[in-house]
Amino acid sequence: MPLLQEAKKVADEFSYGADEVNRGVEEFIREMEEGFQANGTTLSQIPTYVTAVPNGTEKGLFLAVDLGGTNFRVCSINLHGNTTFTLTQSKVAIPHELMVAKTSKELFSFLARQIEAFLKTHHADHFEAHLQRVRSGTSQGGEEKMFMLGFTFSFPVQQHGINKGTLIRWTKGFDIEDAIGKDVCALLQAEIDELNLPVRVAALVNDTVGTLMARSYTSPGKSGTFLGGIFGTGTNGAYVEKLSRITKLTTTKDQTSYDTSTGEMIVNTEWGSFDNPLKVLPNTPYDADLDRESVNPGIQMFEKRISGMFLGEILRRAILGLIDNPEAQLFKDSDSSTNDVHSTTTIAEDSALFRQWGIDTSFLSIVKADSSIGLRVTRQTLERDLGVSAASTEDAQAVKELVSAIGRRSARLSAVAIGATIISTGRLESTGHKSSSAGDDEGGIVDIGVDGSLVEYYPGFEDEMREAFREIKGIGAEGEKRIRIGIAKDGSGVGAALIALVAGQMNDI
């Protein structure tokens, strides 16, 4: 079977063995330590000014908005104070022209209008009462009638306070140069005020921080949550760190006051940019081509090998490589007698295979999960999504070989980031430690909250991560058993609400 042999050769290019995993961990820890000392490092290690995680008793009604990728979500969250909450939400796709708009106002005015529509639909009484106060001139002093809003903004920002942060760079296909260096909370608040909405942007939240907070609220237990990780459209991690290690908090200008009583602070790693110079990261021709033709070449190199936005494109390029390989003969059954479905295989001229970003990562999940006879589901999906009609079983097997290799590498790279963070903080060594926010005395458990389509829907993603954990020096088989991973549902919603609650109690926001 020449095709499967050639597919295996391509799959082997995505191999990421134990030695490479451990080299990755060592470099990740080095970049973490570098990021503690100064701004502008490869791993940003951004202080969030959030110094504790919730315990599940918090109460109140809050708004949250989430700009995390290709969609914008508006939510209202009612925290019940017993580790449960009620969430109402709406979601809208971001028009592509706004992702690359000339001015930031175009994007942020669109976001404010979605907040307005949500309030009119789900909180009409509150909204109308506010408008009456504005019209009658009695809105002054009505701060208690304002919605406190947590703004989940899942792009690299330099945070200067709990509701202040300037955009460092765009990722995930956004490219609005006008917004770089501006305070994104102020940009949103300006558009909210222009519409006279009863909303105050109280907290700037990265989705990973929100995931950590949500996990800790809904699963407080004896062991507070240590790390929140996103493995979806993009990838990033935030975790609880000792204040004493974040030396740039006391050595850089523009200091902001924060609570030091816990001795800890949540740090936003921005690990999507880990090893941008490619010192240790794997780099196939497909990775190199994807990066060169992306909107941000040379940046977010870790994310480009892990996250949902890029895995489909890596697969597309690998499939095209096989199609162009005369030895492989992928999708080349021109004679129906050689095809097990007795029909010639054709690729539509307008197939998504020939279009950049033409394969969605959901395609990988479908193929990976397929255990049907003759990979019937994969062949049907090839026809439906990619315009490949009458693909043979061998064609489907070749595609699945590539999918499995790309997904496995993604999971093992993800384990590098989580594993390095655990080792750097000594979390597995401090079995007797009980902190206010991330205690791990529950049998030495390290609790991790995760969210995102990859970790939730790609079959075996966590299993592949755990296999890599067992191979990491400093974790091993025993340490891997103490790592508890749980899905944090609605992390960017309830997490942002929890930080808005904290922010609303502060005097200096």
Image (cartoon, helix red, strand yellow):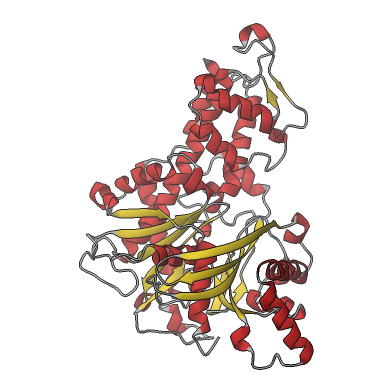
Q: Is residue 465 above or below residue 269?
A: above
- Tell me what residue is drawn at x 43 percent, y 75 percent: 58
Q: Does residue 352 sit above or below 106 in this rendering?
A: above
Residue 229 in the image: state x and y as whole percent. Answer: 46, 58
Residue 16 at x, y percent in the picture: 42, 41
Name the residue nearer the viewer: 109 or 280: 109
Q: Position of residue 297 (x, y in %)?
A: 64, 53
For the question of whether residue 41 can be seen, the reply is no
Left or right, residue 430 beside residue 103: left
Residue found at the far left of this picture: 432
- The part of the image, by quadrant, that contains residue 150 is bottom right
- The residue closer to the viewer here, 322 or 102, is 102
Q: Quadrant of residue 482?
A: bottom left
In the rendered image, the vertical position of residue 442 relative to residue 353, given as above or below: below
Q: Can I make out residue 405 in this image?
A: yes
Q: At 66% from the left edge and 26% from the top edge, which residue is drawn?
A: 324
Along the horizontal axis of the image, is 9 left or right of 289?
Answer: left
Which quadrant would the C terminus be assigned to in this image? Answer: bottom right
- Give whichever of 58, 424 is nearer the camera: 58
